[in-house]
């Protein structure tokens, strides 16, 4: 079983990464790392899943930072199942003190939930997100409708994932109602 890292370890690694940077850089995280750093600090992570970064220098700095801790946390490029996702305008900074050059950005809560649906994030993780940052069904539906026009994955798989989230967070009756409308 892979070792998971708690928020303090994650933030420590990011501070070490920041110390290795020669200039300001931004990094957009998704998945469990975004969930932990942006919304649910009690959730542990396996690694940092990077959606995008402003410069290759971040990857080099991460390698050097990894050498300074006993069990390195790795960056990995998020698999891109989406094309043209329009959530970038709603990114928010993850709370991280003690950094000079590094800005860590995470998707807004509704976008995080939908990216989770598209990428297979576990329903309990999304329930934690909803518990700490309550989602509205209307916003989820609105953004899901945009997402269906933007992703490159099979629409039926995205629809099934979305309805699973709605069932888990808002109940089966809401999911059935939305499922009937989407047919």
Image (cartoon, rainbow, N blue to C red):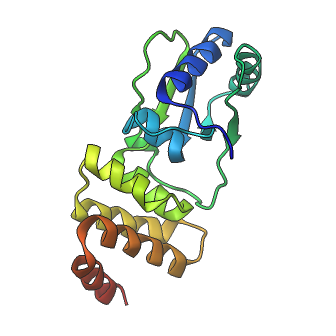
Q: Is residue 149 above or below residue 132?
A: below
Q: Is residue 135 above or below residue 63?
A: below
- Residue 5 in sight: yes
Q: Which quarter of the rendering shows the C terminus?
A: bottom left
Side of 42 relative to 19 (left or right): left
Residue 60 figure quarter: top right
Q: Is residue 173 above or below residue 117?
A: below
Side of 37 relative to 110 (left or right): right
Side of 93 relative to 68 (left or right): left
- Residue 22 in sight: no
Residues 166 and 7: in front is 7
Residue at 40% x, 73% y: name it: 164
Residue 151, position as x, y percentages in the image = 55, 66
Residues 22 and 165: in front is 165
User: Residue most toward the front?
Assistant: 1
Residues 21 and 5: in front is 5
Residue 122, position as x, y percentages in the image = 48, 59
Residue at 51% x, 45% y: name it: 32
Q: How many marks?
A: 0
Q: Is residue 97 above or below residue 9?
A: above
Residue at 71% x, 25% y: name it: 71
Residue 153, position as x, y percentages in the image = 60, 71
Residue at 33% x, 68% y: name it: 168
Residue 37, position as x, y percentages in the image = 45, 33
Residue 74 figure quarter: top right
């Amino acid at each position: 079983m892979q070792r998971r890292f708690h928020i303090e370890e994650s933030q420590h690694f990011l501070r070490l990464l920041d110390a290795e940077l020669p200039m300001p850089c931004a990094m957009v995280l998704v998945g469990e790392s975004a969930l932990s750093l942006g919304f649910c600090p009690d959730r542990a992570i396996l690694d940092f899943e990077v959606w995008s970064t402003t410069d290759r220098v971040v990857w080099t700095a991460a390698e050097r930072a990894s050498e300074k801790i006993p069990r390195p946390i790795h960056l990995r490029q998020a698999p891109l199942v989406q094309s043209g996702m329009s959530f970038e305008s709603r990114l928010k900074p993850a709370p991280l003190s003690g950094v000079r050059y590094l800005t860590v950005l995470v998707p807004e809560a509704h976008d995080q939930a939908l990216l989770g649906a598209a990428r297979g994030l576990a329903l309990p993780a999304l329930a934690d997100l909803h518990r700490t940052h309550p989602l509205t069904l209307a916003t989820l539906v609105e953004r899901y409708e945009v997402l269906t026009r933007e992703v490159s994955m099979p629409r039926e798989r995205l629809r099934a994932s979305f309805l699973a989230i709605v069932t888990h967070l808002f109940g089966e009756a809401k999911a059935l109602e939305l499922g009937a409308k989407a047919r």
